[in-house]
Image (cartoon, rainbow, N blue to C red):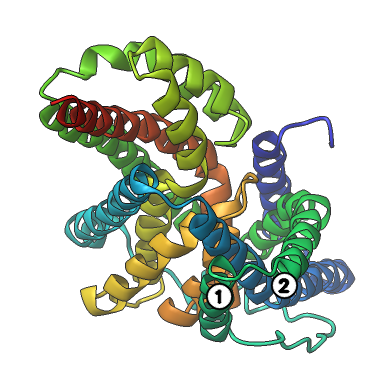
């Protein structure tokens, strides 16, 4: 199973979970057989509970380590073009988030129907036992602490604390890569097993399919919007350059990693006329800080799950969430699914997601992560075009 990529393992986990969870309903188990099956599903629910507890414990530590180090590094590298690139990337992410929200408000209520509480939580089968492991601190506390530490380290000449936090970041990255990411397919399999076992599979799959299509179509649309803005700003048709980005787009689909796509995206940017210096600076930077595709998935996905749970998404709830999500995405770990892992704390604390709802948004994001990553790296080139144009204009002014 390790030889398979993350997406095939995730899809395999969903299929296995559905098949195993449906056994009771397919064969109409009764008596001892039904009790044995119920005991098995309770074991599955126990794993989900323990893994969910572990996730809740790790998330605040992830936020502190990644956001603090990210802010410290930003201060270290700060210059005019860096600031411009950062503003463009953050603005793109925020625009993507709000556009996704308004699209969701217009389209999702007519597409997504409320499904039973059992389908969301798998509440018919309770864990055999639970272990209480409270996070060291809450998510908002983690964010505030990360801002204080990050800004402080950016303006401090002493690197001792920065090295300490960076070591913590390396440990959390190792936990993500060695424990959490490999177990995510099992976690998702358990989620779908519980959903199938309570007989609420079809409404959930139907919701997933509709959300997947809406997210994918808007991600493609947002790529075109970014190239519209880039064309207007640069006073040049950038659409003709999209075909040269296709190798990078398909590389991102296969790797689910913006970082792994950097060499191909760099080559595409230079082939599209971006100056070498700007491409070498902007493309690697945006691979880390520009996650518009992830934002679209998280916003629309969260809205769909809330509607399915009988909760009405409001602008008052989502506006601060999107603004904070933009900051969190800047420091998201560069691993497959890193966007949802970094955002999970915000989703829980600001949107009020339960454990069952978190399982669904994790499953949706991981299954859609390839297209989100491809959207991210394509948008990176639109930003590179604009930064290159700004640099060109500045050089012309200095020449005068």
Label 2–label 1 contact, CB within 8 A: yes
Decide if residue 340 is on the left or right side of residue 40: left
Q: Position of residue 322 (x, y in %)?
A: 34, 66
Please tell me whether residue 110 is drawn above or below residue 198 in the rendered image.
Answer: above
Please tell me whether residue 392 is drawn above or below residue 309 in the rendered image.
Answer: above
Depth check, front residue: 20 or 358: 358
Work out how far the residue at label 2 is from the one at label 1, CA to CA, in angstroms.
10 Å
The residue sitting at 55% across, 86% down in the picture is: 141
The number of numbered badges drawn on the structure is 2
Please tell me whether residue 90 is drawn above or below residue 10 in the rendered image.
Answer: below
Q: Position of residue 393 (x, y in %)?
A: 18, 29
The residue sitting at 34% across, 78% down in the picture is: 311
Please tell me whether residue 62 is drawn above or below residue 149 in the rendered image.
Answer: above
The residue sitting at 59% across, 86% down in the picture is: 138
- Secondary structure of residue under mark 1: helix
Q: Taking the image as drawn, is residue 278 in sight?
A: yes
**Where is residue 81, by image quadrant?**
top left
Q: Which residue is mark 1?
A: 152
Q: Residues within 10 Å of mark 1 (few under 14, many from 20)?
A: some
Q: Quadrant of the C terminus?
A: top left
Q: Residues within 10 Å of mark 2 (few under 14, many from 20)?
A: few
Of all residues, the one furthest to the front in this rendering is 400
Q: Which residue is mark 2?
A: 161
Q: Position of residue 57 (x, y in %)?
A: 72, 77
């Amino acid at each position: 199973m390790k030889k398979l990529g993350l997406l095939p393992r995730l899809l395999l986990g969903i299929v296995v979970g559905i098949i195993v969870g449906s056994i009771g309903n397919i064969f109409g188990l009764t008596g001892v057989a039904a009790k044995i099956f119920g005991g098995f599903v309770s074991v599955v629910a126990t794993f989900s509970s323990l893994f969910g507890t572990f996730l809740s414990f790790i998330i605040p530590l992830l936020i502190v380590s990644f956001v603090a180090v990210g802010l410290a590094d930003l201060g270290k590298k700060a210059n005019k073009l860096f600031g411009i690139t950062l503003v463009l990337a953050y603005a793109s992410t925020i625009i993507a988030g709000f556009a996704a929200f308004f699209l969701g408000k217009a389209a999702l209520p007519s597409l997504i129907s409320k499904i039973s509480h059992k389908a969301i939580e798998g509440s018919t089968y309770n864990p055999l036992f639970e272990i209480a492991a409270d996070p060291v601190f809450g998510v908002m506390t983690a964010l505030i602490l990360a801002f204080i530490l990050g800004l402080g380290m950016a303006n401090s000449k002493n690197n001792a604390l920065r090295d300490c936090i960076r070591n913590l970041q390396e440990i959390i990255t190792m936990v993500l890569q060695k424990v959490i990411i490999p177990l995510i397919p099992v976690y998702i399999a358990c989620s779908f097993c519980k959903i199938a076992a309570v007989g609420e599979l079809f409404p959930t799959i139907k919701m997933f399919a509709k959300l997947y299509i809406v997210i994918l179509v808007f991600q493609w649309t947002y790529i075109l919007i970014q190239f519209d803005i880039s064309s207007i700003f640069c006073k040049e048709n950038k659409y003709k350059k999209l075909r040269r980005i296709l190798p990078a787009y398909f590389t991102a689909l296969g790797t689910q990693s913006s970082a792994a796509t950097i060499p191909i995206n760099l080559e595409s940017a230079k082939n599209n006329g971006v100056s070498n210096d700007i491409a070498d600076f902007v493309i690697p930077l945006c691979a880390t800080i520009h996650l518009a595709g992830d934002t679209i998935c998280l916003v629309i996905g969260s809205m769909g799950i809330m509607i399915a749970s009988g909760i009405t998404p409001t602008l008052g709830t989502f506006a601060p969430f999107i603004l904070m999500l933009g900051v969190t995405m800047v420091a998201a770990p560069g691993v497959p699914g890193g966007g949802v892992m970094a955002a999970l704390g915000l989703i829980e604390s600001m949107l009020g997601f339960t454990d069952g709802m978190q399982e669904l948004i994790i499953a949706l994001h991981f299954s859609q992560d390839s297209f989100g990553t491809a959207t991210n790296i394509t948008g990176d080139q639109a930003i590179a075009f604009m930064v290159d144009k700004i640099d060109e204009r500045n050089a012309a002014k200095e020449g005068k």
